[in-house]
Image (cartoon, coloured by chain):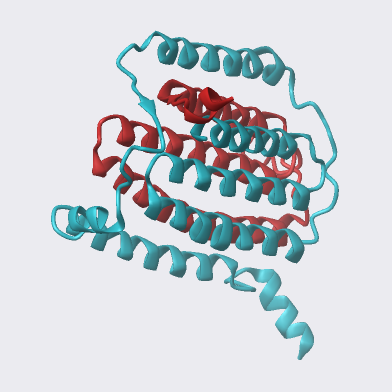
Chain colours: A red, B cyan
């Protein structure tokens, strides 16, 4: 039991968690049918990539990896604000959030 | 201790992400995403990124998810209907996801230079972070503030009611 308490975690486990979260985000992007939930899947993918950045920053003892995550967070905040404004505009124009009915640009 | 904390919060993370996919109501998905982001903040702390852990809770789990839940409630988004997408999705999309995950996992597992993380590793303090951010990377930091400003203006311009469209005009003339 004491070995369980003092055991270290391989960094590859963090990277694997990040990969699985990213894949779940892609999966959500494919199977979700609500515009807001699709957008949430994109946020999930961004978070998964951030975890990879922090893991590599720990591996190479580099501060810049963490600063990159900081910038990603800022861009994500801007993206969320603009994206949700677009979603509100789409809802106002078409009165639906189902991605199957927002198909004006479909070939 | 590190192992136990990692397994616990990685489990929370995965459970939240899977719950996000399974829930059919957007508000439940948003709350699951908050669980994922808060668990990720703990994982950042385990990796010694104290400032990012705080920023993750404040910016992601706080500000961004409040915006999401606000929009879900504002638009009164109901239960989503489950259509399984087009045939192209099933034929190309899902195998592509599995292949992507397989490739990334193979590359990670074959990498031998990766070390381990323990609680004895030092943490990157906010002081270390800000020293680099405000000396070497000052210009990108300032450019980001311009980006945020443009994003705010864009969001206001997009979400403003009756933004130059004929419907808004006709509503106003009808009111007269």
Identified at 37% across, 43% down, the residue is B48
Q: Residue furthest left?
A: B135
Where is residue B143? Give x, y as percent. Answer: 26, 60
Q: Residue furthest front?
A: A2
Where is residue B138? Give x, y as percent. Answer: 18, 59
The quadrant of the image that shows the N terminus of chain A is top right
Where is residue A56? Give x, y as percent. Answer: 33, 31
Identified at 59% across, 33% down, the residue is B10
The number of numbered badges drawn on the structure is 0
- Residue A65 located left or right of residue B109: left
Whether B142 is drawn above or below A46: the answer is below
The quadrant of the image that shows the C terminus of chain A is top right
Where is residue B72? Give x, y as percent. Answer: 73, 58
Whether B34 is drawn above or below A60: the answer is below
* Relative depth, front residue between B4 and B41: B4
- Residue A47 visible within the image: yes
């Amino acid at each position: 039991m004491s070995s369980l308490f003092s055991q270290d975690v391989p960094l590859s486990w963090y990277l694997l968690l990040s990969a699985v979260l990213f894949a779940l985000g892609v999966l959500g992007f494919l199977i979700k049918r609500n515009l807001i939930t699709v957008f949430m899947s994109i946020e999930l993918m961004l978070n998964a990539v951030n975890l990879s950045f922090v893991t590599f920053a720990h591996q190479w003892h580099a501060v810049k990896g963490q600063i990159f995550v900081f910038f990603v967070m800022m861009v994500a905040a801007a993206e969320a604000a603009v994206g949700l404004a677009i979603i509100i505009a789409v809802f106002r124009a078409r009165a639906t959030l189902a991605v199957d009915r927002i198909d004006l640009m479909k070939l | 201790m590190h192992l136990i904390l990692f397994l616990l919060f990685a489990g929370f993370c995965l459970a939240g992400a899977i719950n996000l996919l399974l829930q059919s109501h957007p508000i439940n998905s948003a709350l699951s995403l908050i669980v994922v982001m808060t668990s990720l903040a703990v994982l950042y702390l385990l990796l010694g990124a104290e400032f990012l852990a705080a920023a993750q809770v404040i910016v992601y789990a706080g500000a961004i998810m409040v915006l999401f839940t606000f929009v879900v409630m504002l638009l009164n988004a109901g239960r989503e209907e489950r259509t399984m997408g087009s045939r192209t999705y099933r034929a190309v999309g899902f195998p592509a996801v599995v292949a992507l995950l397989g490739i990334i996992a193979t590359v990670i597992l074959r990498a031998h230079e990766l070390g381990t993380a323990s609680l004895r590793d030092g943490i990157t303090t906010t002081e270390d972070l800000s020293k680099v951010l405000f000396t070497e990377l000052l210009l990108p930091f300032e450019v980001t503030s311009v980006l945020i400003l443009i994003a705010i203006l864009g969001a206001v311009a997009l979400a403003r009611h009756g933004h130059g469209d004929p419907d808004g005009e006709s509503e106003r003339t009808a009111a007269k």
